[in-house]
Every structure is written in structure tokens, then in C-alpha cells.
Amino acid sequence: MLAKKMFLKNKYQYLGVLSNTIRLKENELWGINDLDGNEILPMQFNEVFTLSFGLRLIAAREGSFWKIYNCRGEEISSERYDSLFPFYGMFGITKIKKGNKFGLINKRGRKIIPISYKKIERFGSGLVFLNFDSTVEFIDRKSLIHLPEISNDSYIDQIKEPVKNILQNRIAKKVNPTRFPS
């Protein structure tokens, strides 16, 4: 029924099924519909993709900025990002970029690491954070899953301290960051 309803109305450049949604491209613009053909995001975006399968968050780029929407097409915050880089397999974490600074958001779209780092990259079984003063910090996979925003799915809206302070103040005392020489 869905295919008949969708294809009788329009011919699309692209049609792809995501988690309970359909990603559509028409006239070089992208949108999202639900499986019944109801519009979630109108076809006005330069690019769209599913950011969090379990929570069905959608990342959409309009012009040069990215925004994050829920499965009903509502913005989850007024934040606009220059770039989004999902770290698949890393607990639903997404690297975000504003200007020349990077941070991290969790699978609910909430900041877990502030947008204040020169670079964030995967390294072994964790993440490396390069500061603007050329110092480097590391958080391993075990420590990462103990961050309250990941392990408890809590909604904490306050801006977070740098990684070294998160590890010192909010993770169990037995877990310590490893510092690398610059």
C-alpha cells in the first residue's frame, strides 16, 4: 500500500527506508516521511540522515548548518552545527563542530563534551582530545560508558567541564585519564 501511495504521487530521485521512516529526494532536496507517507520533515533540506536509530533522531542540513530533529519533525534544540560526525559503535556518540571547535553529543542530542577542542578522534578503544594549547587528553571506552549522560541517559543541560575534569569529578575515583606528552 505504501509503495503504491508514494509512487503514484511523485517520481523521486531517491527513496530509502530508514528506521520507521522513508528518506526522499526530489529536485535535489531531501525530506523524511513516516511509513504511512505522512511528512515528518518537508523536502527542503540539502541532506538528511538518521542520527540515532533507537531514539530516531534525524540530522538535517539546510544551507550550511545542521540541526537535529526528533521522529515527529520537531527541533530538539536551537543548536546549529557546521558539521556532524557520528561515531558508530561508540554508544550513539556524535562529534559536532562549530567554527573551528569540536565537542560531543549523546544519542539524545545532548552535549556531553563541550565544543571547545581543536580535534577529537578515535584512538584504539577510546577517544583522543587535542586542546588548542597542543596538549592531548584520552578517554578510554570503559571510562566513556561511565559518563552519566551515556550510562543513565540523563538529561543534563549544563555546559560540561573539560574531559579531564569530567573524569576527575564525575567518574568513579579509580578511573583516571591518560595524558600524552605534546
Image (cartoon, rainbow, N blue to C red):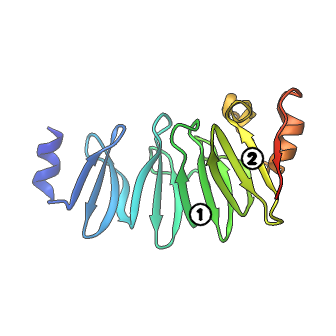
Location of residue 106 in the rendering, given as x and y in whole percent from the top left corner: 63, 43
Query: How many numbered callouts?
Result: 2
For the residues carrying marks 2 and 1, which lies nearer the camera in this image? Answer: 1
Which residue is rendered at x = 78% and y = 60% of the image? Answer: 131
**For the residue carrying disc 1, how many other residues have a C-alpha within 10 Å: few (<14), some (14-19), or many (20+)?**
some
Residue beneath disc 2: 157
Residue 2: x %, y % from top left? 18, 41
Residue drawn 10% across and 53% down?
8
Residue at position x 78%, y 49% from top?
Answer: 137
Q: Is residue 152 visible?
A: no
Identify which amino acid the numbered label 2 is placed on.
Asp
Residue drawn at (54%, 57%) of the image: 84
Query: Disc 1 marks which amino acid?
Result: Tyr
Query: Which secondary structure lies at badge 1?
Result: loop
Mark closest to the chain's N terminus, 2 or 1: 1
Location of the N terminus (image quadrant): top left
Q: Nearer the viewer, residue 77 or 116?
A: 116
**95 sits to left or right of 166:** left
Q: Which residue is mark 1?
A: 81
22 vs 145, nearest the viewer: 145
Q: Percent x, y for residue 19?
A: 37, 38
Quadrant of residue 82 in the image? bottom right
Left/right of residue 130 with respect to residue 108 in the rendered view: right
